[in-house]
Image (cartoon, rainbow, N blue to C red):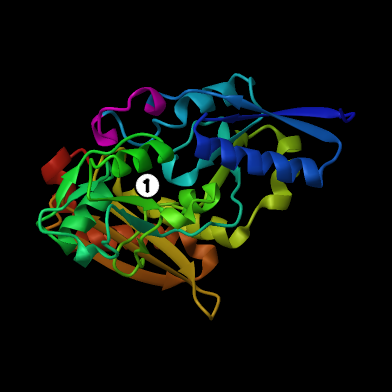
Amino acid sequence: MKSAERAIKIGTRGSALATKQAQWVKNVLEKTHPEISVELIFIKTKGDNIQDVPLAKVGGKGLFVKEIEEALIDRRVDLAVHSMKDVPAELPQQLTIGCIPEREDPRDVLVTNGDYKYLDDLPEEARIGTSSLRRQSQLLALRSDFKIETLRGNLDTRLKKLKSGNFDAIVLAAAGLHRMGWEGEITSYFSPDEFLPAIGQGALGIELRKDNDDMMELIASIHDEQTAICVRAERSFLDRLEGGCQVPIGGYCTYDQDGRIMLTGLVGTLDGKEMYRDSITGRPEDAEQLGRELADKLLSMGAKKILEEVYGNSC
């Protein structure tokens, strides 16, 4: 056993994917800082405990992070590793996202039963498994005949449900399958041009207490500023639109060849019959402002009506 000057505790969910992600952070930190040892602390969240109800019906954002954030605040752990798409736009006052490593593939993917390769190959009224309102809306916008059915559970559980014949196809995030080494399960990829990812999809976030300067220095070496800027723009867009409401929202930001960022966002109805989508380009240093501007643009195009009709004027 190595002699360590400091012991660091990382809070994480216990799923295979969450463990893989946290283990990657542990390995990188121990390699770049030989004087530390890192222990993973597994914490069960509300989202892990509720497996038979669509996320939108039990609170959506925050279901996979709240208990881990409480452990951070109570100083039971020093760091937390999250999938950024699970992290609400508003964090507890004591906490901050101190590091966002380089993003994995942000795209959604199709995984099918049988010989179907692309969405158009699926039979009429095919059963598609997902609990994402964003995916549901975009799937039905592409093909209104699809039967969207609730699919919850960890990544391996979802794949088992597909293989057991419960669905003709399911839609998953490429990033999770890549991180698990399960790329062979992917039937085809959706281009962000046709199927917009979730806010922060493919990105990890390392959360910590704002007053923990030592930890901030420790994780600085795995921070990727370009990824962080893009995620910041996406989360600003979400924050301006959502306000805690559960609606089909997608957003994706990239750098162009001139060093500017382009943010694309959408708001849709659950049935996919109405879809408001647009893009905005600007300077990386204006990422958050661009997010708000794009949100306002979609609201003025008609997205505000969707929010108000579903959730009332409080949205």
Which residue lies at the image location 42% right of the left edge and 53% below the top edge? 185
Numbered circles on residues, count: 1
Residue 76, quarter of picture: top right
Q: Which residues are magenta?
A: 47-57
Residue 54 lies in the magenta stretch: yes
Q: Position of residue 77 (x, y in %)?
A: 64, 25
Kindly identify which residue carries mark 1: 239
- x and y percentages locating residue 87 in the rendered image: 45, 40
Q: Position of residue 6 (x, y in %)?
A: 82, 28
Question: Toward the viewer: 27 or 187?
Answer: 187
Asked if residue 263 is positioned above or below residue 150 in the image, the reply reads: below
On the question of residue 89 being in view, the answer is no
Look at 53% across and 66% down and name the residue there: 284
> Is residue 314 on the magenta stretch?
no
Q: Three-letter amino acid code at disc 1? A: Asp
Please tell me which residue is depicted at 85% across the width and 40% down the height of the picture: 34
Asked if residue 117 lies left or right of residue 146, the reply is right
Looking at the rendered structure, the secondary structure element under dot 1 is helix
**Horizontal and vertical percent position of residue 66:** 46, 27
Label 1: how many residues lie within 10 Å, few (<14), some (14-19) or many (20+)? some
